[in-house]
Image (tube, grey):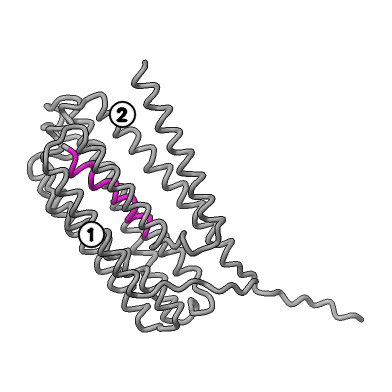
Amino acid sequence: MEQNQVVHADHFDPVASKIGMWLFIFTEILLFGGLFIVYSVYRFKHPVEFHLANEELSVTIGFINTVILLTSSMTVAMSISAMQLGNKKLTLIMLAVTILLAFAFLVNKYFEWGAKFHHDIYPGSAFLFSLSKGDMLLFGLYFFMTGMHAIHIIVGVVLLLVIFFKIRNGSVNQNRYSLLENGGLYWHLVDLIWIFLFPLFYLIH
Amino acid sequence: MSEHKAHISSYKSHIVVLVCLVLLTILTVTITSVHLGPFNTAAALLIASAKAAIVLLYFMHLKFDEKIYRFMVTLVLAIYAVVIIITFFDYLYR
């Protein structure tokens, strides 16, 4: 009898897996892109109130968080370079730094939102209902968009943690690091969204 | 599986990119602290777009990867731009 046992080759296609990641990123761009359009339409319809409500947000905290996210983007990019060069230790260190920076971002966000809550500014608060329609819309968008972004940060931290342990046990390695690259792409996306959130909510008066 | 030589960005180039991004951030904060009316918004969005382009090209590796990714991203951004333009034609000339 003939031997008809099939040896399955390992199906591994880094180009295809990256295309898949990009397709997912496009859905995210459309999600946040839609919100940016909502923001600009409301801003167009309520220019004065948007102007006043924007002054409430601290540029300093926004700036610090921007630098934190940009730096964390760099450390992820560095961890990929280190992986390609076969430096496992540096890869892990850079990933760990990224995760720490993500926590720093969230802590900042906690204090920022906390200060807002302290001033009775939170979704559904009586104070917000006493404001004009434009103010309400701006704060609604602020909480929704930065909140949605913070959820993406938390998801990113979980993803990076999984990748961290997979690198440590060797299932993600120098010959097969698509997961690290795709995780990196996700993290850069989070950074990309913040690049637009920062000027829209903190800077433009 | 095709063995393709991946481009490896040097550590130094990552640092240069980060410095550029931080400088652009400082620039945008400085510009918007001066009251220039509608130019504030334009400048802030322009600088944000420049930063986004840098992140896409260097950190997200579009500049060095296969051209297919760059093609896909350009297409999606073009579609998004069309949606923005149509929306604002609607609101401006309603």
The spot of residue B5 in percent (x, y) is: 55, 74
Q: Residue at x 92, y 81 (%)?
A: A1
The spot of residue A64 in percent (x, y) is: 17, 58
Q: Please, what secondary structure does the residue beneath circle 2 have? A: helix
Q: Residue at x 38, y 55 (%)?
A: A189
Q: Nearer the viewer, residue B65 or A91?
A: B65
Subunit under mark 1: B
The spot of residue A68 in percent (x, y) is: 23, 62
Q: Residue at x 28, y 53 (%)?
A: A150
Q: Residue at x 32, y 74 (%)?
A: B12
**Which label number is shown at residue A41?**
2
**Which label number is shown at residue B70?**
none
Residues drawn in magenta: A188-204
Please give left or right for residue A153 compared with residue A201 in the image: right
Give the vertical position of A123 relative to A10 (above or below): above
| Main SS of residues in magenta | helix
Q: Nearer the viewer, residue A2 or A72?
A: A72
Q: Is residue A189 magenta?
A: yes
User: Which amino acid, by three-letter code, is at mark 2?
Assistant: Val
Quadrant for the C terminus of chain A in the image: top left
Q: Nearer the viewer, residue B55 or A28?
A: B55
Give the vertical position of A100 relative to A139 (above or below): below
Query: What residue would you read off at disc 1?
Result: B22
Quadrant assignment, res A66: bottom left
